[in-house]
Structure formats: structure tokens, C-alpha cells
Image: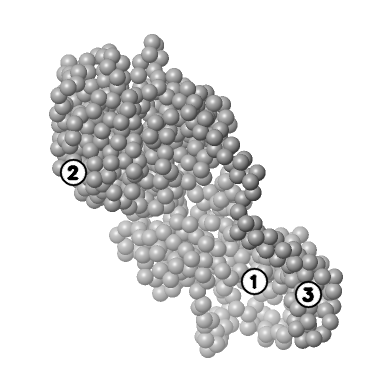
Amino acid sequence: MSNDLWRWADPDGQQRRVRLDELRAALAEGHIAPNTPVWRAGWQSWQAAHEVPELSSASLGGATGVVLNIPPPPLAMVAVQQEYEAASGSMAPPPVKSDVEEEPPPPPRYVPAQTKSPSIHPSPGPLKTQLGGSAYVPVASGGAPPSPGSSRGAVPDGAAPKLAPSLPTTIGIPPPPEVLAAAAARTRSAPPPPPPAKPRAPGAEMIEELSGSMLLDSPSTSDLSAAGSDGLPAPTDPLVQDGLGQPADDDIVDAGIPRRPNLTLLLDDIAAIKQGRPPKNKLLIGVVGVLALSVLIMLVAGIASLFSGPSSSSSSDSKKTAASASAASGSAPATSATTTTTAAASAPAEIPPPPPPQETKSGVVLGDCTLSGDARTLAPRAVIASAIEARALDGRLALGFAASARDAVAMSLDPSSLAPTATVHAKPAGGDARRVTPMLSGSKLIAMPDVDRKNDHLASRRVVAASSLIDVGVSDGEIVWAPHKKDSSAKLFSVDGEGPIEALRAIPLTDRKGIALTFRRGNAIHVGVAKGDSVLEAEGPLSKISGSGQVGSPAIAASGDNVIVAWADRAGTGADWSIRWATITIGSEATEGTPFTLPAGGLGEHAMSPSLASLGGGRFLLAWTEGPVSNHQVRAITMGKDGSPSGAALSISASGVNAGQPAAVVGSDGRGAIAFLAARGKALEVQAAPINCSPR
């Protein structure tokens, strides 16, 4: 039945009771999102509105902004309804049943999907509504009192109409008085409207019941229409208010205000010229003709200059520019760090940039990596707690690190020489920089620092540059995701075990839309994959891989259909650190890690701080720190799809340099770098060595 009670829930878990026809109207008009959870008596769990057959068409209208063309009811049904209302003498709702109502389970958490405004605006006048069972009293026009013969809803002369108490509603609110007054003033200045149509007989008015009378709670209009700091509706709003209380543009036009009068006059004059009659607005026609002639002359001049080629003076200027650029590039290794840091110090840190290109093109499989040069110093200072983030961006390599707790740095490098081409700084807002991700905003490099802010709804919030910027974090002991810098979140994974969730990392997948993430909890490493674009959904279970004892921070990479994770652990405080790794096919689960055997030729003893870079086809590059206490070196080796070493091991850091915390990156053309921290006195500096992993 259309009057059965349903329930829907907002992102905060607040439930509302509503009839089926009211729920369809709210979905079709975009007041609630198509993926809103709904429930009715007899269901075991909540379902998304767009998955329910009774609501699918209304959800489609709300998602696309197209108002479905539903025909009006037959006149026979209208007559029967009016006869029933006249005979009943009361519009009061039926008494509430005394039976205990079935209560639904707790609604799921979700992020409302974006809705579009209806393609057809509602009429400018307020809707006639029947709220809370009160009688409908028509509004008198022109100050005339209601008809004395009307028995239902009649009001004595001189007395204001009194309505029965009803709950407030946010649907059908008329425009503000000042807007109505402005529209009326413009209507008076317009030509007189045609005579009104013959009014209906008394009692023939249709009354539409709206969902306001069925809400369990009724938030104020001001709260619902509040927008976020970026001008968009707040993610936690139960309804997306689309210009509530303001007249639409089409409504003002319908009040008698002409639309684009100059364009209309111009079109009329053109039509008159075609018919051989003189135009009425000769000045307007002349101006348009002069503009058209100017555009034609500029077009001809542009074509002529294109075919004539550059002048001799411009050719010489371009040669001088190229020569100066070549000279500047020759001296770049010695001065680029200081120059680019000063020039780019004002780069914005809070502008949400578009995501960077994928690090490895889909389908490209790279070969074994070799060292193509010696390590060089890139920055004189870095903080070990933030480590180094390495990315491939638009044909260049980029590093992100923190020069101090409140100084986030992003640096782009030439992939052949590793000479810095740009350096930008950003000051983290709300705390120290936990991690710095280099990104592109258009074609400009920016530094995006992750900060653990106080009172943040997401603990350990980390940004992921997928097709759109999203954040992952921890909320109520669960792994959740949220739009970038927003508090509204949705669950991805429940986490078993005890202890805090630490060392959370997330990366975009390379061959499909989605992300992969990993973190440490207690003595176990967890790995999960989520699919989707602007809305994420868990794909497969969350893998839990137990360590042998104490566990370090994990590294993660995606290669083809596989996700690779590596970490360091040791059985006890007196044991050596060693590296273990695991491969998880997307959609499946892994429970055990594989020990990594150190290749010969290194310092031996401890192996820790692994870093991974995708080579495509399930292959990857593994870099790590090796050696005894206070004497470490950075090494790397290529790993095949089957997990066996491929090619020779590489010594990345120079002999005698105490180095560690590597970060590996490989571009789609096979050129890459391994950056690391090197001790120099009491400070740590950023160094990097170039590598080459040519396509196979």
C-alpha cells in the first residue's frame, strides 16, 4: 500500500518515518541521496534506496536531476476522493494502533551520493498542504472573505483562521515577502495579464499531503540550508536544500519580466531584413555589423601570420632564449636548490589539487633495475619521523619530506640527472607534518602535509590522490574513508585485535579505480583493498598477517592485479631485524608472510625500513636498510612475479655513509630514483641515486 510507513536514515544515524509516496517524492526531487538507507517492517536489514524496486525510479530521478513525467490521476479517482472527504466531515488521521511497532536494526553509516537539481523548477506559489490533520483554509485573494456557504474550513468574519497544531515542515515554504513584493512590482509594470480562467467550484480544490507531517523530528530551515566552508552543502545535512525559500529564475520570468530583450530585438530585426523590411533598431544592427567585421579581419590576419612564419627578430629572440636556458641548465646542479626554494615559497598548501598520473602505465612491464649514477645530496635537512614520500608526476620524479616539524617540502627532479627543477614549501595547519605527499595543482607542484589534528573525526587521517582526493583514517576502531577534509565518513573495514592502529598508509591502484591500504596493530600487519571512484567500497576481506614478534611500519605498492606489502620484524629485543613480505591478489586474502633473504655483498646483520615500487605485471623493486647499529647502508633488488630475486642487488648509498629510510619510485618510462636519509654530523640530509628499469 502507498500509505505503509517506511524509515530512512541520515549520515548521522538519525531515523525518520515517512510514507512510501512521500519517500518517492523526496528521492525524485533530490532532497535525499539515492544511496540513502531505507527500512520497512518485515525487513532484516537496511537497504540503499536505489536498490529497492519500489524506489528505483524515484532514486534515478534524484541522481540525474530529471523529473519523471508521471501522469495525473484520472478525474474519476479525484471525484471519488472529494466525495469521500465531503462525507467524512473530518480530515483527522486514523487513530494510532496500540500494537508495539517493530524496531529496525541500527542503520549503516554512509556518505550521501551527489544529487542533481531537478530539470523542471516548481511553480512559484506555495503548495496547499494538509499537515497534522488540520483543516485546509484557502487564502483569500484581494482581501475578500471566504464564502459563507463553505461549511468546512470556514472562518467567521473578522477572525483570523486558526489551524490545529502541526509539525513544522521544510517542504512548500513560500518565498520571502520582499521577493514576492519585488516580483509583484515588476508584474504591475509589465503589460496586463490575460483574464483569469474560470474558478473551480467550491470544494473542488486538491490537497496534497507532504512528508513534513510524518517526520519524527523537524530541523530548522536555517540548519538545513547551511553550507560548508567551500560553498557546498555540508556532508552531514539530512536534506540537500536547493535554494529553499528563494524563487527560481524561471519563476521571476513567468511574473512578466522579459528575458534578454536586446537579443530578442536583434533577432526580430534580422527577420525583418530577410523579409525586405527596414529594421527598427538601426543602431543595434550597426554595432553588431562592426563587431562581426572586426572579428573577420582578425581571423584573416591570424591565418595570414600563421602561413607567413615568424619574423627574423622573433627567431633571434627565441635562439637567445634557448641559449640562456641551456646555460642555466648547465649550472642548475649547483644553484637550483636555493633558487627554486625562494621562487616557490609562496605556493599554496591548502588547494585540493587534481590527482597525479599513475606511477606505472597499465599493461607496461618494466625490466630489472640497474644503478645509473652516484647518489647526490638534494636537501641539507629532513625530519626522520616524516621519512620521504616518492612519486612519479607528469614525466618527472617528485619527493616529499619535512625540513622541520612545521616546514613541509615538495621537490621535483629531472629523471635523468636528478637535478631539482622546482621546490615548494608549505606550513602544516593544526599540527606537525606526519607525512608530506608531493602533488600537482594543474601544472604546479605543491606539498600536501598530513597532520594529526586535535578533535579530528578521523584519527591518523591520510590523503590519497586517487581520481579525486579522498582521506582514509580511523574512527571508532574501524578503517573509514571520507571526502578530503570532510568529517562525514563511511566504514571500509572492521579491525580485529587490540592496541592502537598505527603506521596507516594508502595508495591508488594502478590498473583499476580504487585504493590499497595497510597498517600495523599490535604484532600484525593488515592489508585491504577498496574499489570505486568518488565512493569507496571494500573489495574482499581485510588480510591480517601475524609477525614473528615486534613489527615495524609497513610499505605497500600495487603491481597489476596484486598488492605487495613488506615490513620488518624480529622475535625479541635481542634478535636481528629481518624483512618479510606478502603478495595479495585483489579480492582475496593472505595470512602469512615470506621471509626475505639478504643477498650477498652487503653489511649484513639487521635489515629494516623496506620500500616498494611497482614495475608492472606483478613485479616490484624492493629497497631496504641493512647493517649493524650506527653503520647502515641502503640496498635494492628487483623481485619477479613469483617472488624470486631478478637481477643483481644494488648498493644505493655510498660506502662509509650512515644511510637509511629509503623511498623508491619508478616512472612509466623506466627511469627512477631511490631517495634516502644520510647522517651528516647531528643532522640528516636528503640524498638520492638514479636508477634505470627499462621496459622488457
Mark 3 or mark 1, which is nearer to you?
3
Q: Which residue is mark 1?
A: 123
* Residue 514 badge: none
Displayed quadrant of residue 276: bottom right
Say if residue 329 shows up in the picture: yes
Q: Are marks 2 and 3 in contact (CB under 8 Å)?
A: no
The N terminus sits in image quarter = bottom left
Q: Position of residue 446 (x, y in %)?
A: 50, 36
Q: Please tell me which of labels 2 and 3 falls first in the chain.
A: 3
Q: How many marks?
A: 3
Apparent side of residue 501 relative to residue 64 in the rendered image (left or right): left
Task: Say if 318 sits above or below 537 in the image.
Answer: above
Residue in the picture at 36% in, 26% down: 688
Instruction: Give the distance between the C-alpha atoms of the residues marked 2 and 1, in whole angstroms.
Output: 64 Å
Displayed quadrant of residue 86: bottom right
Q: Amino acid at mark 1?
A: Ser
Q: Position of residue 296 (x, y in %)?
A: 70, 66
Q: Nearer the viewer, residue 106 or 166?
A: 106
Estimate how packed mark 2 is, as few (under 14), some (14 to 19) or many (20 or more) residues with alpha carbons within 10 Å. some
Residue in the picture at 34% in, 44% down: 668
The C terminus sits in image quarter = top left
Under circle 1, the secondary element is loop
Q: Which residue is mark 2?
A: 641
Q: Position of residue 368 (x, y in %)?
A: 23, 38
Q: Which residue is mark 3?
A: 265
Say if residue 409 shows up in the picture: no
Residue in the picture at 38% in, 34% down: 416
Q: Nearer the viewer, residue 264 or 330?
A: 330
